[in-house]
Image (spheres, coloured by chain):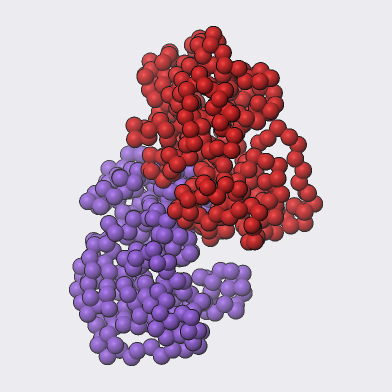
Chain colours: A red, B purple
């Protein structure tokens, strides 16, 4: 089958072996696939991954021992956990030390004509959610992880640093809390959606306001942390969403003196993301910058630079 | 001026003295007034109040020493605090021991042609919010107080007991968190709005599901607490919103054995309520059951029984 395979660089392979069904898992054919910044970081060496790339998808189950799943349209949590270790048993399956991660760590990803995922990771997609919205469930869940981890009060002043793919979903989640909300970014051409949604947008180079109660860094760039640090108030909170393949420096003594809390944040809950999409509370259509066949995957990655979401179709 | 005055019973008075401007306050003429369950409870003896009734309003400032306010369309926080005592200085102005409360405690309310409120309580209403929506800011703020007080996670299963005026706003706030959400009530004729919004609705007499992580009681009835108690899981949380003029009993040993948390909840933040209305995230039009001139205020209170929001216009 066709697959986008990463080893030192990305290759379009036409003869990749189709996955064989194994017990407890399902063979899924993707309907739509999203390109994530993490994919780009993997291509720069993040996680030392080798295999089929990709973890954002909506697809259809085509093989499964539990036949009730066959034909079902699904999304899937990307962490395939052992579900038997102490970490899993206390409910933290996305932190399982034995996990593989779809298209990121020791498990082939979704940028292929078919892939495997444990049944325990799958969620059916309600009919009201089109593929073009469902493909955003994984990053929307990552946005929801912020309010899963932290109690954000409606009276707090929030800033989100980064108007890219993830920032575009994070601001749409945080506006629902009724908070005063500012998006700080470098892409004014993307802001009309957010301004219509009641979100203040300012350019990173034109920041005058500071003293925010909570600041999210989702720039995916080392510089984003400095900007977030400048924006947060003493005793405020910083949510760190960026993953990149480079060391980064933060003046921790400033953090201590100002008693700032740093909260790392990664994968989030899928079921609430599906509920928000089904309730029509998140706009995804304006976030799609382009759509390519899987066979043009290499061109799609070239086109993804500086864009919002690029989708692939097998 | 005309006013609805409560002393033992409600009276329509045509010659009530118009309020005189005092320093730090504003004379406001209401554009629209809402009838709240608390008004009905006051008529049953709650708070031992004597004076002009009413605390839900949107109005226009007509007299104020700070002339910038004159002509401004406003809503207003109902607790007039001293802003000098230790409770106020730590930021808990709505708990000031020296406070008066609009139409509830030692301060004439809004069901009149004009009333007084401190400038510190006032918030301008953005032009995008019509009077018919702005009049809901006070109860919407009370709904937001729940997420101001408690960290509710998107993955939690929530139930709201009570499909009345306040419950109708509380479910609309909680659905924005992406939570699995059930409304438990006795008025199926009101549910089409909520079902369209992705909220499950069940009749109080037909409850089968229990084990909810968090349950809100906003029935305004002593029995609501029992229902909430039945729905909540061990180690779950109950948010108590009902105020009524009657003693109530709760089996506290059951609460201890099951380690349930009880959280009382009252007035909430106005600015986030205005932001949610401005962002178009709360539907208020379907919650209006009727509209009466102030001169027919006694009939309006009779009509309010078993209805959603009844509005008065001076």
Instruction: Please state the total of marks drawn on the protein image.
Output: 0
Question: Considering depth in this image, is B307 or A227 the residue closer to the camera?
Answer: A227
Q: Can residue A97 be seen at all in this image of the molecule?
A: no
Residue at 42% over, 86% down: B63
Farthest residue toward the right? A253
Position of residue B91 in the picture relative to residue B57 (left or right): right
Residue name at image x 30 percent, y 74 percent: B43
- Where residue B264 appears, as percent x and y from the top left, is 47, 60
Q: Is residue A163 above or below residue A81?
A: below
- In the rendered image, which quarter is residue A31 located in? top left
* Nearer-the-camera pick, B299 or A290: A290
User: Looking at the rendering, which quadrant does residue A213 occupy?
Assistant: bottom right
Q: Which residue appears at 78% of the width and 49% of the height?
A: A251
Return the residue nearer the eye: A292 or B117: A292
Q: Residue A307's x, y, as percent?
A: 55, 37
Name the spot of residue B157 as percent of width and height, x first.
Answer: 43, 42
| Quarter-of-image position of residue B70 | bottom left
B242 in relation to B29, above or below:
above
B26 relative to A47 in the view: left or right: left
């Amino acid at each position: 089958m066709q697959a986008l395979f990463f080893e030192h660089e990305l290759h379009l392979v036409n003869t990749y072996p189709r996955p064989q069904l194994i017990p407890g898992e399902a063979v899924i054919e993707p309907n739509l696939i999203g390109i994530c910044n993490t994919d780009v970081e993997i291509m720069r060496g993040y996680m030392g991954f080798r295999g089929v790339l990709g973890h954002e998808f909506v697809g259809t189950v085509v093989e499964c021992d539990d036949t009730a799943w066959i034909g079902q349209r699904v999304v899937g949590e990307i962490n395939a956990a052992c579900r038997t270790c102490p970490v899993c048993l206390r409910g933290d399956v996305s932190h399982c030390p034995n996990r593989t991660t779809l298209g990121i760590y020791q498990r082939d990803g979704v940028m292929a004509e078919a892939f495997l995922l444990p049944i325990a990771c799958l969620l059916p997609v309600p009919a009201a959610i089109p593929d073009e919205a469902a493909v955003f469930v994984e990053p929307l869940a990552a946005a929801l992880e912020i309010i899963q981890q932290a109690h954000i009060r409606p009276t707090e002043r929030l800033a989100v640093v980064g108007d890219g793919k993830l920032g575009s979903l994070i601001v749409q989640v945080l506006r629902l809390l009724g908070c005063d909300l500012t998006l700080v970014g470098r892409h004014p051409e993307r802001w009309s959606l957010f301004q219509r949604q009641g979100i203040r947008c300012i350019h990173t180079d034109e920041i005058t306001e500071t003293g925010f109660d909570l600041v999210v860094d989702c720039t995916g760039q080392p510089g984003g942390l400095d900007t977030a640090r400048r924006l947060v108030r003493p005793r405020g909170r910083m949510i760190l969403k960026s993953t990149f393949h480079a060391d980064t420096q933060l003046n921790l003594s400033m953090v201590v003196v100002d008693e700032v809390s740093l909260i790392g944040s990664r994968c989030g809950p899928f079921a609430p993301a599906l509920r928000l999409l089904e309730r029509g509370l998140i706009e995804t259509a304006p976030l799609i910058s382009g759509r390519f066949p899987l066979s043009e995957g290499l061109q799609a990655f070239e086109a993804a630079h500086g864009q919002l979401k690029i989708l692939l179709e097998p």
